[in-house]
Image: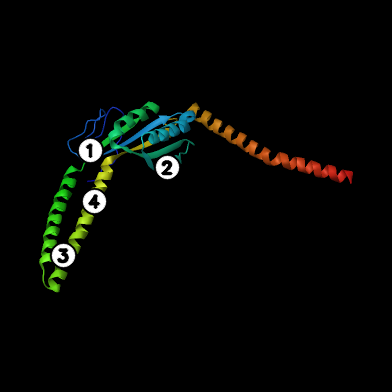
Amino acid sequence: MGISEPYFAGTEDMAFSENTITRDGSFSQGDYIIKTAYASTDVSSSNFESTINEVEVLVKNYSGNISNTYLSTNYQGLKSYNVTMNIPAEEFENFLSEVEEISKFTNINLNANDVTKYVLDIDSRLKSLKDEKKALEEIKEEAVSTSDKLQVQSQLRYINQDIQVLEGQKEYYENSVSYSSLTLDIREGSGVSLFSWNYYVQRALNWIESIIGFGVSFGIIAIPLLFLVLGFRKFRSKN
């Protein structure tokens, strides 16, 4: 029942699970299909934050939600933002297309896990249990002795527990099918070599930004203190 592990094979070469999804949105047969996608995209440092913002706004526009985020930095100082988004299943293909308009996928893996047979099995078992429950309730109504009624009541309790478990499983599948997920890795300046001049330019710009930020912060604190010290000295010289 599990969804296969992500496999990146390139933008044009798709990896498929037993039940497949194509880029044009056609799926294998089945009424209950859990759709997932794993993708990555490379962006420049100047577009890193704006790409994240645009993707997250797009999720809201599709009435989706974000279930997980993770921000990391590699040894080169380049950031990577991993985000998992859940989108209404009927809009999933359109959503993927619009994400790729923001930044073209470097790699993508699409999976469709058909759980129809599990849902049908649950429906069959639920029908049998409910039929059995109805029969026991009729027996309980006709029972004369207290011991017979208690025995039937005990059997009904176990049947109700089994029904609740199966209904919970079916609800899980229905919720999983109603939303499809995309896990996207947005990578800043991916592929920049340690020996590339681009790497050193990016690092220099980061350092300059840090120095300017430190200078501004220091100035906000130091300038009022300087005026305070000068004012105190002027006050002392008058006295």
The amino acid sitting under disc 2 is Tyr
Rendering quarter of residue 225: top right
Q: Which residue is mark 1?
A: 17
- For label 1, count other residues whose C-alpha is less than 10 Å away and answer few (under 14), some (14-19) or many (20+): some
The residue labelled by disc 2 is 70
| Few, some or many residues within 10 Å of mark 2 (<14, 14–19, 20+) | few
Residue behind mark 4: 169
C-beta proximity under 8 Å, tags 2 and 3: no
**Residue 53 against residue 120 in the figure, above or below:** above
Q: Quote the CA–CA distance across marks 2 and 3.
A: 49 Å
- Residue 185 shows in this picture: no
Q: CA distance from mark 2 to mark 1?
A: 26 Å
Q: Give the amino acid type for the residue marked by disc 1 in the picture.
A: Ser
The disc, 4 or 2, on the residue closer to the chain's N-terminal end is 2
* Label located before the other in sequence (2 or 1): 1
Taking the spot 15% from the left edge, 55% from the top edge, the residue there is: 130
Q: Cβ–Cβ below 8 Å for labels 3 and 1?
A: no
Q: CA distance from mark 4 to mark 2?
A: 30 Å
Query: Which of the two discs, 3 and 4, sits closer to the camera?
Result: 3
Q: Amino acid at mark 3?
A: Gln
Residue 175: x, y in percent? 28, 44
User: Does 34 appear above or below 150?
Assistant: above
